Amino acid sequence: MKYVDEYRDPALAVRLLAEIRQTVTRPWVVMEICGGHTHAIMKNGLDQLLPAQVELVHGPGCPVCVTPVETIDRAVAIAARPEVIFTSFGDMLRVPGSSSSLFMAKSAGADVRMVYSPLEAVALARQNPEREVVFLAVGFETTAPGNGMALLQAKREGLTNFSLLASHVLVPPAIRALLSSPANRVQGYLAPGHVCTIMGWQEYVPLAEEFKVPIVVTGFELLDILAGLLMVLRQLEAGEHGVENQYGRSVSRDGNPGAQRIMAEVFAVRDRPWRGIGVLPASGLVIREHLAAYDAERKFAVETIRVREPEACQSGSVLQGLIKPDGCPAFGRECTPEHPLGATMVSGEGACAAYYKYHRTSHA
Amino acid sequence: MHNLNPEDFSCPLPIMEYETIQLAHGSGGRLSAELVSRFFLPRFGNETLNRLEDQAVVDFSQGRLALTTDSFVVDPLFFPGGDIGDLAINGTVNDVCMSGATPLYLAAAFIIEEGLPMVTLHRILLSMEKAAKSAGVQIVTGDTKVVNRGCCDKIFITTTGVGRVPAEANISAANLQAGDTIILSGSIGDHGMAILTSREGLSFASRVQSDTAALNGLVARMLQASPAIHAMRDPTRGGLATTLNEFAAASGAGIVLQEAAIPVRPEVRGACEVLGIDPMYVANEGKLVAVVPGEVAGTVVAAMRSHPLGREAAIIGEVVAENRGMVVMRNALGAQRIVDMPVGEQLPRIC
């Protein structure tokens, strides 16, 4: 397949692996921020192929994983209303809230539908004027513009029965929080290519400067990840720290200004809780006041939600790179994809799910 | 006018009092009788069915019977490469013949939603007739029920099949042994992606066609080449990954696959990439995976490739003594990963 196979060429991968082996002289800890990276690393078995000195730790870049339990509980409560058609990407449906998931709500009679695009949800609102269509808008900077655009589209069409339950988060505040933590042991970062396609790489420059860490914006194919890793390791070995862009075919310095304009028009930046991590300053997006009519959180008053998290789940430590998924005592025992305790075991991008899916042999 | 199909002339829609199915068509009364005599019998008629007894009585020689049943609820009813009619025939024929059996007779039960256009039912019956003929099986008994609007979605079909198992066949998922070879009859993921990309809401142009086909001819040729087939299944819902996990679990053996050897059509790969779906978990309706002793693998593959439905047959892996009960895939770089059972609902109502 064109434009995919070129980036998965095994012969080139072998060459990049050899270069990495030649470059590395001592142990390094590198974090891939994005769950898409984690998934590609595990699927390709890169952790088996890299030299032992290179330790990859998995970051918090899985939007499903960091969505607060409170948001899931709110989604379940809204979905249960008889007038509501509740729409979401597939991943979010199985994420456990305090006592229920959207899938469980669906089997209990709620009208919950999986969509592939927020514009499908807008179309549902158009076709069902007597119903209220709510789209669960989660994700990083990557999905925020598309979801914002859907909201603006509904507004333009004069649809009054469409709203977003928005739970968007931002990457740079999360990296700042991880780097500021006394427990941090990460020395270099692979930054998320899709997020930077929207935002550009310039917003990572202050982080690299302040914390003296190399940050390489990296794509998601096998060769992208190996090349991004090689760039980080070269900087580390040379004692350098700067922002580099491996994903030049998609990412520019300033990103996509049109998408950024939509984000700014629809969303305002706020402090926000991350599931398993806690509140991070200026790390989330909320729908602006003048668009309150499209904000499901304001439209549907949900009674005070009392959040309950399973005690055995250590997804917070996993998301911060403090432990590997199989370091959690519940991994593969109480916590499996069939009976997930935390969101990291649910999402295709969650580190626990990726470990369970691809690499159970070495730990079982 | 160049699109006229000769079949539309040879099998015209019978003239009926109503243009859509009425509750009374399932009443057992006059309309039911008319539906059977004017819709079903002209399509499926044979000596046994024409007797219209409460049961089919058929001759059977001594030996072993294979018996299976399957319900079909696919949405949409008509999809690129097939429809619920040929799917209902092929699916049950395939389940019978995966035991090595020669499929002989089918029973078909229809649950129809009030209001289904007669022309839709007719199209489905034509397609079943064609598929049954091509598979060489007879529909010898059946049933029709009509339910209120909203109590089922358009039409659900259940088919039950019986076949004769040859004395020398001993095919079971429990039979895998270290040293066995795993053979796949062709590309994976075609049916599931054809359904998914034709679903409403996915504005997604695609050339993916369902692979729905009856595999009994291919199986007969394989058994002719070597009766020593250990295990055989058609990887439908859950895809190849699920079938291989069932093999591994039933036999307690380990399976190692070579990723590069598994054929996936470019258009299926493309659709899977865009939608973030792994073709290993996508349904097939005209493919089989067989486990055979290593020493006969070449003979079986050659026999399969001589049949139109096995032209792309390939050896995709082997059975090993390690990783018991697990399926592991080796990529082109030599790294391994687990291929697990799928969790949750990937895509409802694909068959």
Image (tube, rainbow, N blue to C red):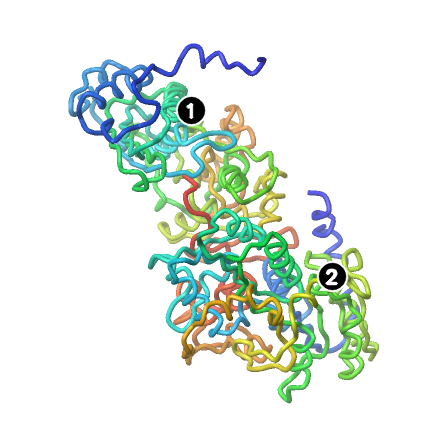
Between disc 2 and disc 1, the foreground one is: 2
Res. B282 in view: yes
- Residue A359's x, y, as percent? 53, 63
- Residue A154's x, y, as percent? 59, 55
Residue identified by numbered label 2: A197
Label at residue A140: none
Q: State the SS at label 1.
A: helix
The chain that hosts pointer 1 is: B
Does residue A224 sit above or below B207 in this rendering?
A: below
Residue at the left extreme? B54
Q: Nearer the viewer, residue A244 or B280?
A: A244
Q: CA distance from mark 2 to mark 1?
A: 52 Å
Side of B129 where A321 appears, left or right: right
Res. A17 in view: no
Image quarter (top left, top right, bottom left or bottom right) of the C terminus of chain A: bottom left
Does residue B36 sit above or below A312 in this rendering?
A: above
Task: Answer few, some or many: residues within 10 Å of disc 1's Cα (few below 14, many 20 plus, some between 14 and 19).
Answer: some
Residue drawn at (82%, 75%) of the image: A242
Q: Nearer the viewer, residue A186 or B73?
A: B73
Amino acid carrying label 2: it is Thr
Residue identified by numbered label 1: B217
Task: Answer few, some or many: residues within 10 Å of disc 2's Cα (few below 14, many 20 plus, some between 14 and 19).
Answer: many
Residue drawn at (54%, 66%) of the image: A295
Q: State the SS at label 2.
A: helix
- Residue B286's x, y, as percent? 46, 33
Residue drawn at (15%, 25%) of the image: B54
